Image (cartoon, grey):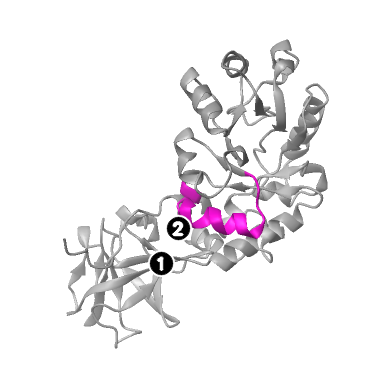
């Protein structure tokens, strides 16, 4: 069979920047070591690409959300270095954890009993200190069943670390109190933003995610974090439209004069949502404003600043995450995780 032609959209990954970001976060973690949140296919950038880079940079602790995310990592890192944040919710998940050696993050008394009933062994435990998602409530920490667990890392998760909020100190104090009630080997509290809050939040292991991939959740991290991903796409068509003609669905753009436009092979099916309307692509530093509404598979741009562009030429979408978040109103997390599967990931 003839192989398919190459894709007309590409998501370049700067592996050197990814490695440098982990090293910077590891350094900023002080006496703690930095792990890596690689859930959601490394925030949409491809775990098979990102995990080996992080491993080679020195990372030894990897966090996913679902058990289905474990197997894709096993060719690259030891199973015992993989922690599953959603815990062991069923006997089947307990059996899979024990068979693979991946570590469940126990978050309830029910899960603790399931884990023990299934044979037990090393595990992590999540304490809820105020975010009210997964994790043991404060009044449950003293339950005798928990003392039967072999807890490697006792952890919690900050709810408002990207802000200067009194909640951060309340959660830190609550977590410190919980650590005195349960035997454990190590502690972990800080995410990417939490690393910037200082030594009191670091424990033994930090769990950066967003900042690894170029996100900047707090200003203190801005100078240390480099952009990692660069989306670009080909022009499918160029054409000239007359004054008064409209572009796209609902005719939301009308040309004030004759102009040359281009159709880019990219759309909201690829994660470039309609929130990008009013933004611009670039080519060799020249700005190509988006015209009209973003379609499922196409975006129309103004080629006035780059009259030499033709079908098949590539244009870039600026994807500095803090700036893109400000421009679109999307969070930096969303900007990464919505990126679609049609991109060639190079």
Residue range in magenta is 41-61
Residue 12: image location, x then y, percent:
44, 67
Quadrant of residue 343 in the image? bottom left
Does residue 200 sit above or below 134 in this rendering? below
**Residue wearing tag 1:** 279
In the rendered image, residue 154, in percent from the top left (x then y), is placed at: 72, 31
Mark 2, secondary structure of its residue? helix
Question: Any mark on residue 179, and which?
Answer: none
Tell me the residue that label 2 is attached to. Answer: 328
Relative to 295, does residue 262 appear above or below in the rendering?
below
Residue located 27% across and 74% down the image: 235
| Magenta stretch secondary structure, dominant | helix
Between 245 and 307, the one nearer to me in the picture = 307
Residue 120 vs residue 215, the one in the foreground: 120
Going 77% across and 32% down the picture, which residue do you hit? 185
Query: In this orientation, does residue 257 appear?
Result: no
Give the residue drawn at x 48%, y 35%: 66
Residue 216 spot, x, y in % from top left: 61, 57
Q: Earlier in the sequence, mark 2 or mark 1?
A: 1
Q: Is residue 240 visible?
A: yes
**Which quadrant of the structure image shows residue 206?**
top right
Query: From mark 2 to mark 1, how far is it between C-alphas?
Result: 8 Å
Question: Does the magenta-highlighted stretch encompass residue 22?
Answer: no
Residue 59 falls inside the magenta stretch: yes
- CB-based contact (under 8 Å), mark 2 and mark 1: yes
Query: Residue 26: x, y in percent?
Result: 72, 55
Q: How crowded is mark 2: few (under 14 residues within 10 Å), some or many (20 or more)?
A: some
- Looking at the rendered image, the quarter that the N terminus falls into is bottom left
Horizontally, residue 321 falls left or right of residue 278, namely right
Left or right: where 22 falls relative to 46: right
């Amino acid at each position: 069979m003839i192989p398919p032609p190459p894709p007309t959209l590409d998501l370049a990954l700067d592996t050197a920047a990814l490695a440098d970001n982990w090293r910077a976060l590891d350094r900023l973690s002080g006496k703690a070591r930095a792990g890596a949140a690689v859930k959601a296919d490394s925030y949409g950038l491809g775990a098979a690409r990102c995990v080996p880079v992080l491993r080679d940079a020195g990372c030894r602790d990897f966090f996913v959300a679902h058990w289905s995310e474990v197997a894709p990592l096993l060719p690259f890192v030891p199973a015992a270095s993989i922690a599953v944040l959603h815990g062991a919710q069923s006997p089947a998940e307990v059996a899979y954890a024990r068979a693979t050696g991946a570590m469940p993050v126990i978050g309830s008394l029910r899960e603790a009993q399931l884990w023990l009933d299934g044979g037990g062994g090393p595990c992590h435990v999540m304490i809820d200190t105020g975010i009210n998602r997964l994790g043991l409530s404060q009044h449950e920490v003293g339950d005798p069943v928990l003392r039967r667990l072999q807890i490697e890392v006792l952890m919690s998760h900050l709810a408002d670390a990207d802000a200067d909020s009194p909640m951060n100190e309340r959660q830190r104090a609550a977590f410190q109190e919980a650590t005195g009630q349960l035997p454990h080997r190590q502690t972990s509290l800080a995410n990417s933003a939490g690393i910037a809050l200082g030594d009191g939040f670091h424990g033994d292991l930090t769990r950066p995610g967003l900042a690894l991939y170029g996100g900047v959740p707090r200003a203190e991290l801005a100078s240390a974090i480099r952009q990692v991903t660069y989306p670009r796409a080909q022009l499918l068509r160029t054409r000239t439209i007359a004054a008064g003609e409209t572009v796209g669905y609902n005719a939301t753009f009308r040309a004030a004069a004759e102009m040359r436009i281009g159709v880019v092979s990219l759309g909201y099916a690829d994660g470039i949502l309609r929130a990008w309307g009013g933004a611009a692509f670039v080519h060799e530093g020249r700005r190509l404003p988006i015209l009209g509404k973003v379609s499922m598979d196409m975006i129309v741009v103004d080629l006035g600043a780059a009259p030499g562009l033709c079908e098949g030429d590539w244009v870039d979408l600026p994807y500095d995450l803090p700036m893109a978040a400000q421009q679109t109103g999307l969070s930096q997390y969303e900007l990464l995780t919505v990126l679609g599967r049609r991109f060639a990931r190079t």
